[in-house]
Image (spheres, helix red, strand yellow):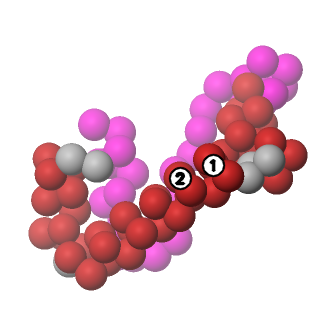
Amino acid sequence: CSAVGVLPLSLQYGFPVIEKFLKGARSIDEHFHSAPFENNIPVLSGLLSIWNVSFLGYPARAILPYTQALEKLAPHIQQ
């Protein structure tokens, strides 16, 4: 993550929230590097995305915030 992306999010949601977010990102990075492919969540997610686009014809992906505090996350990602 760069300061360009983290600073606005920190100002919006607070530094403790962003620290938890970054710890979660670090955790999934470690999982990606250490888990075998058949149990690797990012790999399986990528393969499902390819399947959905290539074989089922679903070209779209939804980002659904699960809490009011994340209501501005989807527009932030879309920019």
Amino acid type, residue under disc 2 in the picture: Asp
In the image, which disc is placed on residue 70?
A: none
Q: Closer to the camera, 17 or 76?
A: 17
Left or right? Give the position of 79 relative to 43. Answer: left
Q: Is residue 48 above or below residue 16?
A: above
Left or right? Give the position of 49 relative to 74. Answer: right
Q: CA distance from mark 1 to mark 2?
A: 5 Å
- Residue at the far top: name it: 54
Q: Closer to the camera, 39 or 13?
A: 39
Stretch in magenta: 51-79
Q: Closer to the camera, 50 or 61?
A: 50
Tell me the quarter of the picture where residue 13 sits: bottom left
Q: Is residue 59 above or below residue 62?
A: above
Provide the secondary structure element on which disc 2 rests.
helix
How busy is the neighbourhood of tag 1: few (under 14 within 10 Å), some, or many (20 plus)? some
Left or right? Give the position of 68 relative to 57. Answer: left
Q: Position of residue 69 (x, y in %)?
A: 35, 75
Q: Is residue 79 above or below residue 53?
A: below
Q: Closer to the camera, 56 or 18?
A: 18
Q: Position of residue 9 (x, y in %)?
A: 22, 62
- Residue at the far bottom: name it: 16
In the image, which disc is placed on residue 29?
A: 2
Q: Is residue 66 magenta?
A: yes
Query: Residue sitting at 35 percent across and 57 percent down?
Result: 73
In the image, which disc is placed on residue 32?
A: 1
Tell me whether circle 1 and circle 2 mark residues in contact (CB < 8 Å).
yes
Query: Residue sitting at 28 percent across and 37 percent down?
Result: 79
Q: Is residue 48 above or below residue 20?
A: above
Provide the secondary structure element on which disc 1 rests.
helix
Q: Position of residue 32 (x, y in %)?
A: 63, 49
Amino acid type, residue under disc 1 in the picture: Phe
